[in-house]
Image: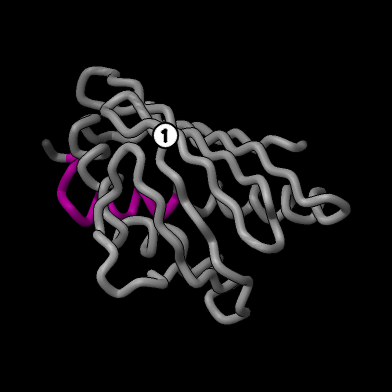
């Protein structure tokens, strides 16, 4: 098992960050172009809730089919999220997001435990780059919302 942990301070209120975390469109935006997620079921809700399980066609680098990625939400509140995720190539992808209110700013941490057999080291290297990229995209998303000015 390998772990990736990445923390950033977002100059936006925690409730703004949390509200965006609830939307599939946010994941799709911050993951691109490293990964693409398209719902398997067109009627699947675009907002996650505790206890929900959803499945996505996953494309590595946005173009290479990489199986079906399943996300089961165990915790989802303003302090953070915990999900159990997996796909055919990476059977363990346990993701935690921690949100800490810093009085007008938010400390945001992604922590992922992963296991993929002999591929784990390669998945871990990709995930390190992916989560650094995601957090940069978060800055762009929040800036575009004008969240820095609130």
Indicate the quadrant where residue 112 lies: top right
Q: Measuring 53% from the left and 39% from the top, which residue is drawn there?
A: 95
Closer to us: 87 or 33: 87
List x then y, in percent, for residue 52. 35, 46
Identify the image quadrant of the N terminus. top right
Q: Measuring 61% from the left and 78% from the top, which residue is drawn there?
A: 65
How many C-alpha atoms fall within 10 Å of the one at disc 1: few (<14), some, or many (≥20)? some
Question: SS for tag 1?
Answer: strand
**Is residue 8 visible to us here?**
no
Answer with left or right where residue 121 lies relative to residue 112.
Answer: right
List x then y, in percent, for residue 45. 24, 60
Q: Is residue 93 above or below residue 55?
A: above
Q: Kindly give the residue lying farthest to the right in the view shown.
A: 118
Closer to us: 65 or 100: 65
Q: How is the image coloured?
A: one colour
Identify the image quadrant of the C terminus. top left
- The residue indicated by pointer 1 is 74
Indicate the quadrant where residue 44 lies: bottom left
Tell whether position 97 is magenta. no
- Principal secondary structure, stretch drawn in magenta: helix
List x then y, in percent, for residue 71. 47, 51
List x then y, in percent, for residue 76. 32, 34
**Is residue 13 visible to us here?**
yes
Q: Is residue 114 above or below residue 15?
A: below
Q: Is residue 67 above or below residue 76?
A: below
| Stretch in magenta | 136-148
Q: Kindly give the residue lying farthest to the bottom in the view shown.
A: 63
Total marks drawn?
1
Q: Measuring 29% from the left and 54% from the top, which residue is drawn there?
A: 141
Closer to us: 107 or 3: 3
């Amino acid at each position: 098992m390998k772990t990736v942990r990445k923390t950033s301070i977002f100059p936006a209120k925690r409730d703004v960050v949390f509200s965006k975390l609830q939307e599939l469109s946010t994941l799709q935006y911050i993951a691109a172009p490293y990964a693409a997620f398209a719902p398997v079921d067109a009627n699947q809700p675009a907002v996650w809730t505790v206890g929900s399980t959803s499945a996505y066609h996953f494309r590595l680098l946005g173009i290479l089919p990489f199986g079906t990625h399943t996300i089961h939400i165990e915790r989802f509140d303003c302090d953070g999220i915990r999900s159990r995720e997996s796909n055919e190539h990476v059977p363990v992808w346990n993701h935690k997001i921690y949100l800490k209110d810093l009085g007008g700013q938010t400390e945001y941490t992604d922590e992922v435990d992963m296991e993929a057999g002999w591929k784990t080291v390669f998945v871990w290297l990709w995930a390190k780059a992916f989560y650094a990229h995601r957090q940069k995209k978060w800055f762009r998303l929040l800036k575009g919302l004008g969240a820095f000015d609130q």
